[in-house]
Amino acid sequence: MLKQTDVLCHECRRSFALIAGDLCECCGRPFDRVDESYRQGELCADCVRWKRDNAWRGVLTKNRSVYVYDAFMKEVIARWKFRGDYALVEAFRSDMCREFFCHFPRDSLLVPIPLSSARLYERGFNQAKALAELLGCPILDALERFDSAKQSKKSRHERLETDRVFHLRSDVLLPADASFVLIDDIYTTGTTVRHAARMLREAGAAAVSSFTLARS
Amino acid sequence: MRFVFEQGKWLPEALAKEKHKDRRPISRLPDLPSCEKNPEFPFSPTLLAFLEGRQLLIDDLPFSLEQIQAHYENGYLRYQKGITQTERGGYRCERCGNERAHLFASFHCARCEESCTYCRQCLMMGRVSECTPLVVSCVSPKRIAYDRPLVWSGKLSHAQQAAAEAVKQAIDRHDELTVWAVCGAGKTEVLFPGIAHALERGRRVCIATPRMDVVLELAPRFKQAFPTVPVIALYGGSEDRFKQAPLVMATTHQLLRFYRAFDVMIIDEVDAFPYSVEPMLQYAAAKARCEPSALIYLTATPHPAWQREIQKNKRMAATIPARYHGYPLPVPAFEWCGHWRKQVQKGRLPRNVLAWANERIQGGRPALLFVPHIALLQQVVQILKQLDARIEGVHAEDSARKEKVHAFRQGAIPLLVTTTILERGVTIPRLDVAVLGAEDDLFTEGALVQIAGRVGRSAQHPNGDVRFFHYGKTKAMIAAKRQIVRMNRLAQERGLLKSP
Ligand SMILES: [Zn+2]
Ligand SMILES: [Zn+2]
Ligand SMILES: [Zn+2]
Ligand SMILES: [Zn+2]
């Protein structure tokens, strides 16, 4: 059960599945969990597709994730994020820190993926920010999410044209040569972090990677 | 969220007309005063019905903040603090009564923009934190009297009748009473006359139980017995969640959402609660009761402390020592089976355990074999499958649990190996049971009495075999056997048993 003094009991702790083994160089997908045909050299088929797309090539340097997003992790994240059991973030601390510094430099600048203001009020905290705070690196709240209500008022054409999920906060100055790492809870298709990375790149960031708690 | 003070009243920051510097979460305010009731106010009957007898979060209420606040300002509802400070400087959750420091945590909250402490114990019912108001109604719940609501053609046994009379009296006088009814006594029917009495007087009745399957099983029985009375069943995700009724079946967790709602509180299987959740249940039950009200506990196996209180007459109790069919309870036999764990490790079972299993299969008698842990269960099932490949095992996390229990009932599985999850609620004719490793800590006196209580439930087959295989007798085993023997003797003395 999750309600122990220690945040997690042994049983639950043992159920956390770390991502390990041979990974896609770019998105960090473990090759042993996908069909062999999905692999093309050191990349997975998804990353090859992103690379071929002129609009997205090179936007995201790489992604790495800590845990496999399996049924158990889904349950833990649901309790943490949707039920709002903030304290569970402690359960991720040591694995998050170890894995992060395996893949990213000490002087990384962390940019948490933001929530819309309505979402933030509903949940009470931003899970991506909570994860970023575990790592002890400087955090820059550089992005804001477009209000989805306002977004839907635009015509379909406008939306496709702009296709923007995030915008840069007007009061933020990007140190262009920093090594930016976006922080989020789940990497699914990689679209969210790529949208965020593109905003930072357009604002002058030289290189943007991402790091997430779990990936599917 | 935060409150501000504007034009002589407190209101949520989001509704303020001006900007305020002093904005505070409800826990850092004096208790918000109730407003004087304005009889002219065009209140919303749906909102009041929704809130009747309940204590809810603003997030639970499908009404706008403006509407909620207007009902507050006109004296129809109140805001209470969700989290308060104890005298010793700790925290206390007003919804679930939690005061244990390790079941609180803090975070920087986007709603109040400061460090906000929340309760982890009742989190599954929606988060209560320092900036969370609990909303309660200022209007007391509707009370409707029903004329002769009980339509039931069954007949109570002598043993049931005496207890039913005691229940009725306790309900009438708003007393507390424990009904100690042996497994198979028919305790549900014992409640009928008392509940009918309450409903005739327009009283509101709640039957709370720790298990959702009991709620699902009881609700139709009560609907049938009280056809003119609205009955609702409340559990996580139930469709009746927002309905109101004078007769409510609820899991104990759902009680947390009630506030001074019931004149009669009946708590079924009070012994089934893990010790750790008991304080929360007591708190929730107390909060859900009106003043005055009756409190009835039902149990087949009271905790040892309760048994002592009953014996010393410190706890009012009505005992039903006999089953409804009038045959005595099957008494467990103890059988030493050596270092059985070592045997299981080697892929073997003690000879007497194997012989017991063989006899059941040959004789075509359905049998349950209880083992202490899941890991052991799987090994034991593998060994027994050599005897009969149809043998299966079930445990709490088993996704095919329902199907397996069903197959067992149908006779497709001759012997089912189980953890303690089947200790309650399973009733199968001609059943025999055994416990492998009855000395394990998991098998408390109560658990063993419940397990023995699975056998001989039907009037057609009132006998059966109960065997405790052990590697050293425990106090719990001896106490369980003593309890069963004592109940049989009591039944005999009171002339409640059928003459042989
Ligand atoms: Zn656990
Ligand atoms: Zn990839
Ligand atoms: Zn707060
Ligand atoms: Zn609580």
Image (spheres, helix red, strand yellow):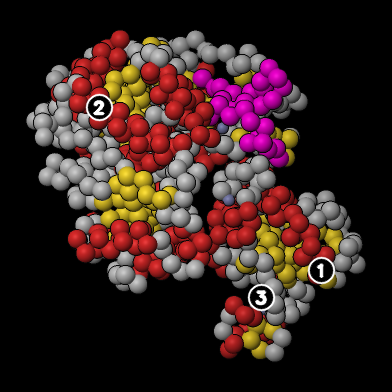
Question: In the displayed structure, would residue A131 be above or below residue B85?
Answer: below
Residue at mark 3: A29
Q: Is residue B98 within the magenta segment?
A: yes
Q: Chain of mark 2?
A: B
Relative to B447, B409 lies left or right: left
Q: Which mark is residue A102?
A: 1
In this view, the residue in front, A73 or B182, is B182
Camera-nearest residue between A201 and B55: B55
Residue type of the residue flagged with mark 1: Cys
At x 29%, y 14%, the residue is B170
Label 3, residues with CA under 10 Å away: few <14, some 14-19, many ≥20: many
Give the residue number, with chain letter if any, for mark 2: B489
Q: Secondary structure at mark 1?
A: helix
In this rendering, the label closer to the viewer, 3 or 1: 1
Is the C-beta of the residue carrying label 2 under 8 Å from the nearest atom of ligand 1?
Answer: no
Q: Quadrant of the N terminus of chain B?
A: top right
Q: Is mark 3 within 8 Å of ligand 2?
A: yes
Which segment is the magenta one?
Answer: B78-107
Mark 1 or 2: the one toward you? 2
Q: Quadrant of residue B141?
A: top left
**Residue A4 visible in the snapshot:** yes
Q: Secondary structure at mark 2?
A: helix
User: Vertical placement of B146 versus B215: above or below?
Assistant: above
Q: Secondary structure at mark 3?
A: loop
Which chain does tag 3 point to? A
Q: Position of residue B144 (x, y in %)?
A: 25, 18
Residue B428, percent from left and from top: 22, 50
Q: Residue at x 40, y 45 (%)?
A: B237
Under mark 2, the amino acid is: Arg
